[in-house]
Amino acid sequence: MLKTLSNLSTLCVLGCALGAFVLTDSRASFARQEDAKSIAVCATVPDLGSLTREVGGDRVSVTVFAKGTEDAHFIEAKPSFIKALSQCDLYLQAGMDLEIGWAPALLQNARNAAVLPGGRGYLDASMAIQRLEVPTGPVDRSMGDVHPLGNPHYLLDPLNGLKVAGLIRDKLGELRPDSKPYFDNRYAAFHLRLGTALVGEALARKYDIEKLALLYEHGKLAPFLKGQGEAPLLGGWLGKMLPHFGTKIVADHNLWPYFARRFGITVIGFMEPKPGIPPTTRHLSELVDRMKAEKVQIVLAAPYYNLRHAQFIAQHTGARVVNLTHQVGGRDGTDDYLTMIDYNVREIAATLGGP
């Protein structure tokens, strides 16, 4: 009898140990399966979708809500967006109230707690950047469509794109720890490609591109490179734009403060009298007079804005209209983040006279 009880006790111990092993192994197996599965990402705008693909490669599947030609302030919410959000691992937005008119309702209706604000799968890309044009006083409707959190069009500065790519890398690595080296390597490759596009490969490999960009911003890059005997090495976007540093421009809408800061151009006015307010004849006439006085040569036009206002100004000033894109996919040949920036730089440089 005692021997039987002893055997039963041994079997119980072995059974518990086996059960614990099976449970541990099944959890480990689930973790491996989870890590092997691609990360489902919902991005509000094409730029974020492109940056996610750059870093995530074949380990992400990306759904983008806004089309390249659309104004991301005003997107028609679709049932397919809610379905995608309900099943995604990561929700990525530009933030700064860019999507305030449509994204919050989608998130609530998706009923996916992981991608709600504060959730593990919620990421506001504006966390990575230094904001411009943040109002210092009260904001009301009489001022037009002013963003109380600052201008949200920060991805038109390629260095902000790089910072956001780093933020995405960190979040993807958090969601899939075993894939972190993969994401790190892809980010490093993207960093070099963007740096090469910005200043040329030789300088991108030798220097911190953010420091070079800061020198450029303050008009000190050319003297610095000359002092190093490296002036001929400057290429890329900054090389194209250096001859036009300080050029004054006019735009249809306030899309360009980050782009203008990065590439050394000055926006002196907009066709809109106030943000989001349609142009008036009186305002356009005043803008024409100012453009003539300050010898403004070009007018920037976004894909979704009525082109006739830009054409009216051009006809009365002799300035040329430059059709830029506010985001990936807004013009032909701007299918990813780097080609989008490249398109805008080339269009301006070619219009002003240059390679």
Image (spheres, helix red, strand yellow):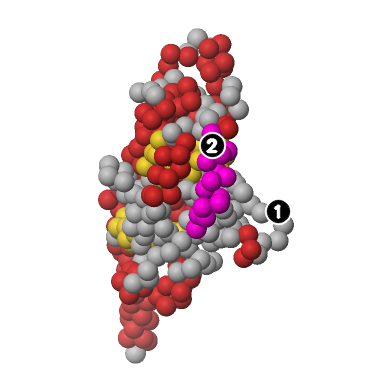
Note whether residue 298 is visible.
no
Q: Secondary structure at mark 2?
A: helix
In the picture as drawn, the residue positioned furthest to the bottom comes out as: 1
Q: Secondary structure at mark 1?
A: loop
Question: Residue, x 39% and y 53% (percent of image)?
Answer: 306
Magenta span: 278-292
Question: Image quadrant for the N terminus?
Answer: bottom left
Residue 291's label in the rendered image is 2
Residue 136's label in the rendered image is 1
Residue 352 highlighted magenta (yes or no) = no
Q: Nearer the viewer, residue 267 or 234?
A: 267
Q: Is residue 350 above or below residue 13?
A: above
Image location of residue 14, percent across then percent down: 34, 74
Question: Residue, x 45% and y 54% (percent of image)?
Answer: 171
Callout 1 amino acid: Thr
Residue 284 highlighted magenta (yes or no) = yes
- Choose the circle earlier in sequence order: 1 or 2: 1
**Residue 234 figure quarter:** top left
Q: Circle 2: is it few (<14), some (14-19), or many (20+) Cα within 10 Å? A: many
Numbered disc in front, either 1 or 2 = 2
